[in-house]
């Protein structure tokens, strides 16, 4: 029964992800299975990110329609002191995190920044969380590999049980 519940949950998530991708980034539709594998165990995070993108896109579309209907141009506000520098620094952080967390999206940074225009802080927060989780996952894998009874391939032990990882040249021999 538990396996059946998991299958149902994953099917529901896949339907939700398919709908959200189809309505936000349809060019990624053929990569849904890869995306789900990449977010394995973090499907809710994927759904939340896509939901935010969908809501932003829907709101942007609604704003554009309202503007078109009223035909009243809205004047551009000059940026406040320091705002340009703050946004430039934020865009640099976002770019760095995208390269680290989702490197397959590195070639689409400009599109991502356009899509999240006005919500850079939210995007930055999500990317930081993803980065922290990736670091924690790597630490857990490192501890698991180096713990007694763990996956210790490539680790030599001295008479006290302390491990000494072999270098790449030693592993190839």
Image (cartoon, helix red, strand yellow):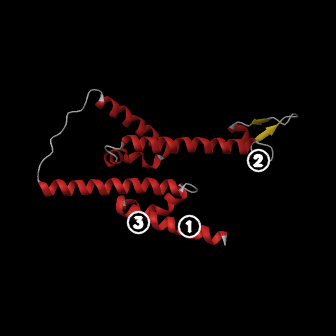
Q: Are marks 2 and 1 in contact (CB under 8 Å)?
A: no
Report whether 6 appears left or right of 100.
right
Residue 172 can be seen in this image? no
Q: Which residue is mark 2?
A: 150
Which one is in front, 148 or 80? 80
Residue 107, visible in the rendered structure: yes
Q: Give percent across and percent down for residue 113.
A: 34, 44
**Where's the C terminus, which quadrant?**
top right
Query: Residue at point 46% right, 49% down?
Result: 104
Nearest the camera: 161 or 115?
115
Q: Nearer the viewer, mark 2 or mark 3?
A: 3
State the residue position of label 3: 19
Q: Quadrant of residue 155?
A: top right
At x 75% / y 48%, what residue is drawn? 151
Residue 88, horizontal then vertical, whole percent: 33, 33
Q: Which badge, 2 or 1, comes first in the chain's sequence?
A: 1
Q: Nearer the viewer, mark 2 or mark 1?
A: 1
- Where does label 1 land, which residue? 9
N-terminal of the pair, mark 2 or mark 3, is 3
Mark number, residue 126: none
């Amino acid at each position: 029964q538990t396996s059946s519940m998991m299958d149902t949950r994953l099917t529901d998530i896949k339907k939700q992800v398919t709908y959200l991708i189809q309505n936000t980034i349809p060019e990624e539709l053929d990569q849904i299975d890869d995306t789900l594998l990449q977010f394995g165990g973090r499907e809710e995070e994927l759904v939340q990110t896509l939901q935010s993108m969908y809501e932003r896109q829907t709101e942007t579309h609604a704003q554009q329609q309202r503007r078109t209907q009223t035909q009243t141009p809205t004047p551009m506000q000059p940026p406040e002191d320091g705002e340009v520098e703050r946004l430039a620094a934020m865009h640099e952080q976002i770019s760095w995190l995208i390269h680290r967390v989702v490197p397959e999206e590195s070639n689409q940074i400009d599109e991502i920044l356009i899509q999240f225009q006005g919500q850079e802080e939210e995007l930055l927060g999500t990317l930081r969380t993803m980065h922290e989780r990736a670091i924690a996952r790597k630490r857990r894998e490192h501890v698991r590999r180096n713990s007694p009874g763990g996956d210790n391939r490539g680790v030599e032990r001295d008479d006290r049980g302390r491990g000494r990882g072999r270098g790449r040249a030693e592993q190839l021999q």
